[in-house]
Image (cartoon, rainbow, N blue to C red):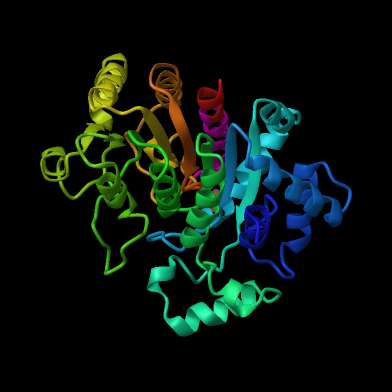
Amino acid sequence: MTPVDTLAHLLRPAGGGIYLVSTGRAEQLALQRRLYGASSDAEVQARWRADLAAALDARGVLLGIPSDVGAGLERGASLGPAAIRARLLEDEPAGLARRRGAGLVDLGDVFVVPQLLHDEMLSAAQLAATRAALYPDLPAAEAAALPVSPLSIAERALALVLAENPRAKVFAIGGDHSTAWPVVKALAAVRPGLGIVQVDAHTDLLAERLGVRYCFGTWAYHANELVGRGGRLVQVGTRASARDRSHWESTLGVRQLWAAEVARDPAAALDAILAQVKGAGVSEVYFTNDIDGTDAAFADATGTPEPGGLAPGFVSALVARLGREVGLAGGDVMEVAPHLARSAGGGERTVALAARYLSETIEAALG
């Protein structure tokens, strides 16, 4: 198969990554038609297929990963990508065309089997059964080479694009924060000197959680190992941790700016983050933005909202400076769960802020 053929098997048009048969299916198809400016489902498919081909020569690519299988106490972030895409369209109807003019191509969504997380957790029998369900039109030998779990599919899809187009910027919409792992892994393979700036209330630095290697609480540990420690992972907005800052910095070589430190002097915090990134020998930054890094007063529609967090203006200023002074390899917005709002209008506020963050990240990376 060609790379485009493989991508077409792994992914779905934007908004189509959640498996729906009856409930919600009509709304899903309507969103896809709006996103693609199409009048029929066949036209959606044709325009998406053209986008897959265009991605192999694009300045940047966008991927939705609507999986919350790697989440914790409360789930719902699987609905984040569709909600954020819809909000972007609402806020700026011409925005998709404008971003496309700047070189961004939408790959669509990872197709998510909602009981699966990563292929290494599956038995041979389950892999075979799910491949038969996902790839019924492929010869068995070809299907056997394809992944079936959302994290594994995301990594394979992005690796395919980056093999053809290694300088493409990568943007993602999650999903719980485990979905940042395949993006970082694919980017690190083609971008020596990659660093990570993580906005988050939590550290996500466990080596494993209840025996699970990749999930919302572990992905940053593995990403930190992947980029070689040495302060190339900078965590900003931390405030909910069983361990203090000195533990994480001394044992794992990360650099942290806890939310209280940022609140005391935001300008100094920005300077410190930029100095750390530049001093660690980072050539490009992946900006991963868990919505719970922002104070819950502004974004409470997430699985684990936390008070005492970052102000939206600080997050916006941070991504702008990283883009201007270091350069972004891409970025994401994670953990938006529209139906988990804790206040009246909280879902709408959170989605609106997430759409703003994603737009600002794309602008900072592509200029």
11 lies above or below 161: below
Q: Residue at x 40, y 37 (%)?
A: 191
Q: Position of residue 353 (x, y in %)?
A: 54, 33
Q: Position of residue 305 (x, y in %)?
A: 39, 45
234 lies above or below 64: above
**Of 146 and 1, the residue lying toward us:** 1
Q: In the image, is 314 to the left or to the right of 224?
A: right
Q: Position of residue 183 (x, y in %)?
A: 45, 47
State whether the magenta stretch is mostly helix, strand or loop: helix
- Toward the right, the furthest residue is 39
Q: Residue at x 21, y 41 (%)?
A: 229
Q: Residue at x 72, y 67 (%)?
A: 23
Q: Which residues are magenta?
A: 343-361
Looking at the rendering, in which quadrant would you find the N terminus?
Answer: bottom right
Res 291 visible:
yes
Does the stretch in magenta take in 236? no
In the rendered image, which quarter is residue 103 located in? Answer: top right
Res 82 visible:
no
Looking at the rendering, in which quadrant would you find the C terminus?
Answer: top right
Q: Position of residue 65 (x, y in %)?
A: 54, 53
Q: Residue at x 27, y 63 (%)?
A: 209
